[in-house]
Structures are given as structure tokens and as C-alpha cells.
Amino acid sequence: MADMDVFSAMGIAGFGKTAKKRELDPKRFDKTKREEVVLPKVEEKPLLPQSGPSKLSTGIPSQSDEDEDDPGPPLLPAGLYQHDVDGVGNEDNEDDRADSDEPEYDPGAFSLSAPEFPITHEATLKEHTKVISALTLDPSGARVLSGSHDYDCKLWDFGGMTTQTRSFKTWEPAGSYYVNDLKYSNDGQQFLVISGTLQAKLFDREGEEKATFVKGDMYIRDMKNTAGHVGELSSCAWHPKDKQYFITSSADSTIRIWDVENKRKQKSVIVVKSKERGARTKVTTCAYSTDGTLIGGACLDGALHMWQASSNFVRPNMTIEGAHTKGTEAGSLVFSVDGRTVLTRGGDDSVKLWDLRAFKKPLATYSEATTLYPGTNAVFSPDEKYILTGTGSSAKGGRGKLTFLSRDSLSVVKELDMDTTPVKLVWHSKINQIIAGLANGTVSVLYSPETSLNGAKLLLSKGAPKRPTVEDMSDALAAPTILTPHALPMFKDGDGIVKGMKRKREKDRMDPRKSRRPELPVTGPGRGGRVGASATQHVVQNLVRDTTRDEDPREALLKYAKKAEEDPQWTSAWRQNQPKPVFANVSEDEEEGQEE
């Protein structure tokens, strides 16, 4: 008998074979591909010969990008048109494109085939019901943290989500208050939640609250003498070098520096003095420079201030009055990596770039960024060649846009239509994906299968769910289930439904009866019908109990009558004339009548 026949007879024919590897569908990303390019618009001949320096976009995002100054190709399929060496549209290739059916570049231009921006595909995280007012990612790009005007914060994990994209934790950090800002620490182990209250809150990575920082005394006029904020919080920022410190800005005209370990009082106070009447103004946003030496703040009166982190904060080291229109809220303040350039996004429909070495007027200004929500921000691209911001619709019910601007001149390089107005934007450098919080409560994750890494790509990289077999299940799960519909609740096994045991164990662990947790002593005031006591008193009270309340007082006294007659130690003085008690004889019938 051959060896394989022996193995088959013994039931081990498959022993020693390598497990079959699961192959992913190469077209799995096509389901989430955006359909943004409209072919009739691209093939309009009057627009093809145009070339020259960059101009502001006219609403057709692809053709304005074909110029000599554009550092890369536009985001279009490879077969739509080709470039010559200088990147200028070549009219002679139009006939070749009509005859050729290959939707690819020639090998010589392979480096231009990769998309310039990671916006070819889109994944949506839809659970919020109102505008996304705060959005951030952890440093590794594995988790998304979102806050909204529906008062909720939600945590999303790319590695644990499926294509259904459900968040794994939802909570209200401050009751019925808007969430204004969220920031992860540099190590990603904790994050700050800034809501419309007076107190900042610190949470760990899993969303469990660690600390609530103190609020100040609103009756003290001098803001330096209060232990915390006395006005609504607006934004926060972590120190880029030291994870122990962070800053918060508020409507009480201060920026406060906090120590994570001390929640009872801030470390330092920066009082912002305005030239307006009352000398106070709301600080709408704040930020640290990349090296931690500068602290920046933008105010409601239009001023932009810079302080040295090592100074005494008596007055700002650099100030620009009227950086943005007075009365509009600046949505963001971002420092470049080199620490020389500052990007601000104002509520006056403008994006401005400032040079700290010549801090008098902006290097460039873009004034067509329609602002519908005061927290709309602008961010640098990972290589800092571009600036990304959201633009609202000028008409009611219109579609918003993602606007890509060139850093040099703030001219429009690309415009991408979105369902509604983008409010909060994050362009993560490690995963090269753009996360946009929209006005309808949707978090849109834009990515490219070619240039992006992990993130939303993980949702489609897990393959189809594996069908469980008998070999994969344990003997206990594979055994037939005994149904006992009339059994007591404690003896029921789930009515034949096989469920995971992890959640059941966690639930039983929280149940003090099932986990047999000893009852803890109560300290402080009484709670739950129990009076507070120390641990020692709690033990002593259980050891010695006073039972006199349960005894009949007549029986308790008469049990000493016989002892008093035998040993009249206390009654010998009046024993001679002591009257003798005479008790009436009561029959059993009379006793029963009295009891009734």
C-alpha cells in the first residue's frame, strides 16, 4: 500500500501540508474609489492648450494644474491625457490618445503615474449627527478621535474596524456642551478634550477619564491670581518635546500652561491684553512651535501674538494687530517644521502665511476660502509644499470643497468636491491620508492605494470573513446544545445561542455577586443606607453586636430574682419588711384571649 493510502486510512492525509494562504482581491479598493472626474469636462478642447503660471482655480480642478510650476501631476487616471517632459499639456498627443486603448503612461513617464494627492479613494465614518467640531489622529495613525456638536466623542480604530466602520467607544465628555478641540499627546497614550466648559479633561488611550483640571474664581478680576480658566475653553496644544505640559486658550483672555500631574492649579498664565475697550478679548486658538520655544495665539480682535516660552509673559515678543478681520474667529494657527513660517486660517474667508523673521505683513494671502463654521482650519501637507483647507458653499445647500494651495503663492492647485462643507482637516504624515470632518457629521477618510499606508486601507485588506468549520470550534461549542426553556434563569445556557465568552466574563467581572468581591468599607459620609466608618470600626461592629433590643425587659429582670434571694448582697437592709409579691394565676384561656 502506498504511503498516501496509509495516511488516508489513518485520517491524516492532510498532515504536514502548508496552509493555504488567503489571497486578497487586487480590485478590492475599486469599491471606495471616488468618481470625481467628469470626462465631458476634461475633453473640452478650448481648455487643453492653456499653460503658463499658476492661477486661481475656476472650479475645474484638473486643467488649472497643468503648468510649468506644478511640481507633480494632477489627480487624474493615467489614460486621460499625457505630459511632455516639462509637464505642459501636449496637443499632438490627442490623436494618439484616441487611437490607443491602453489607460497607462509609457514606461518613461512611470514616475508621474502616482497620484499627487491621496484623494483617489474614500472611506466614510458616519455616526455623528451634527457638525464635526474637533478631529485628531494618534501619532501612529491607527486611531481617529472625533468630537461634534452632538456633544459626543467617538474613538475609531482602523485595525479593529471592518467595512461597516463602527466606532468602539462613544461618550459625552461634558454633558450638553460642544466639543471644541481634541489633541493626542506625543506618545499617543493620552489625549485632551476641550469642551465648552471651563475645565479641560484628560483621558487615557482607551477613553477612560484620568483628570479634570480646576476652574478659576470668576469673581477675581486679575486673571493671574485665579487657579484656572473662568471663560469657555476654545483650543489646546501639547508641548512638542515634553509630554508633561500643555496649553489651553479661553474666552477669559488667557492662555494657561498646565502640568499633567497637577490638576489643582496651572503652571503659568499668559494674559492677553487687547487694545479694545476692557483690554480683554477671546483667544480663539493657540499653538506651540515645533521646537517648543514659541507660543502663538490668535484673538477675536484680529490680533496675532507670539511669546517666548522662556519669558515671563508680561508682553508678547511679536504682535500683529489686524492680522485678520476684527470680530471673526481664527480657526487654526500652525507652525511649519522649520519654525519660521506660521499659517493662519481666519473666519474672514482668508488663509494667510506669515514669516516670523519679517513679522509685519503676510507672505501670501488667499481670500476666497468661504467660512461657514468658525472652527474651520488649515493644515500643511506632510512635505509642506501645499496647504489644505476647507471651503464652504456660497449658496445654501451647495457642496463644499477641499482646496489645495501652493505654499509659495497660495494659489489654487487642486479643488475637490465634497458632500458638504469640510470643517476640520487632518493630513497625517505617517499614513499619508486626509481625514476631513464634514458639516453633516460624517468623517471622510481620503487615501490612495498607491501612496497611502495602512489607515483606511486596512478596512479592505482583511479579505472575506472566514467561514467557521468544526475543526476551528472547540469540543464544547461543537457539541449539541441542550435547550431548557422552563429552567430557572440561573441555569439557562442562552437558549441555544452560542456567544463569545469574553464579553460574558467581563460582565461577570463587574458583577460583585458573581465575582464574589468582598464588600468594601465605606469612608466619609453615608451612602446607600450605610453610615460611613473606618475599616477598624467596620470589623468591630460585625464582631460584637448588642442584643439587648431583642430581649423582653420583664424576663431580663426576673432572671435575677433567684440570685437575689440566695445572695441578698444589696437588699439585706430592708429584707425584714420587704413585701412579698403575689402574682395572679392566669389560665390558658385568658392568655389566648389577651393575645387575640
Image (tube, rainbow, N blue to C red):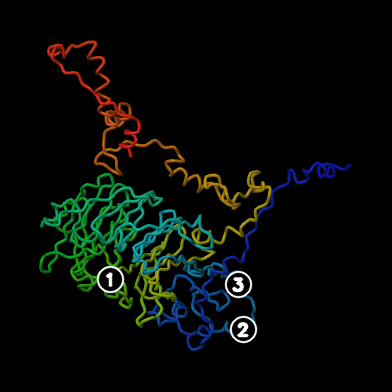
The residue singled out by tag 2 in the image is 98
Which is in the foreground here, disc 3 or disc 2? 2
Task: Work out whether residue 83 or residue 310 is closer to the camera in this orientation and state it.
Answer: 310
Task: Work out whether residue 79 or residue 527 is closer to the camera in this orientation and state it.
Answer: 527
Q: Position of residue 348 (x, y in %)?
A: 26, 75
Q: Position of residue 487 (x, y in %)?
A: 57, 47
Q: Position of residue 8 (x, y in %)?
A: 81, 45
The image quadrant that residue 534 belongs to is top left
**What secondary structure is marked by label 1?**
loop
Q: Is residue 344 above or below residue 576?
A: below
Image mark for residue 346 = 1
The residue singled out by tag 3 in the image is 106
Which is in the foreground here, disc 3 or disc 1? 1
**What secondary structure is marked by label 2?**
helix
Which quadrant does the C terminus fall into? top left
Query: What amino acid is at disc 1?
Result: Gly
Label 3 vs label 2: CA separation? 15 Å
485 left or right, relative to 408 = right
Query: What amino acid is at disc 3?
Result: Asp
Label 2 vs label 1: CA separation? 46 Å
Q: Is residue 513 above or below residue 408?
A: above
Q: Is residue 460 above or below residue 391?
A: above
Label 3 vs label 1: CA separation? 44 Å
**What secondary structure is marked by label 3?**
loop
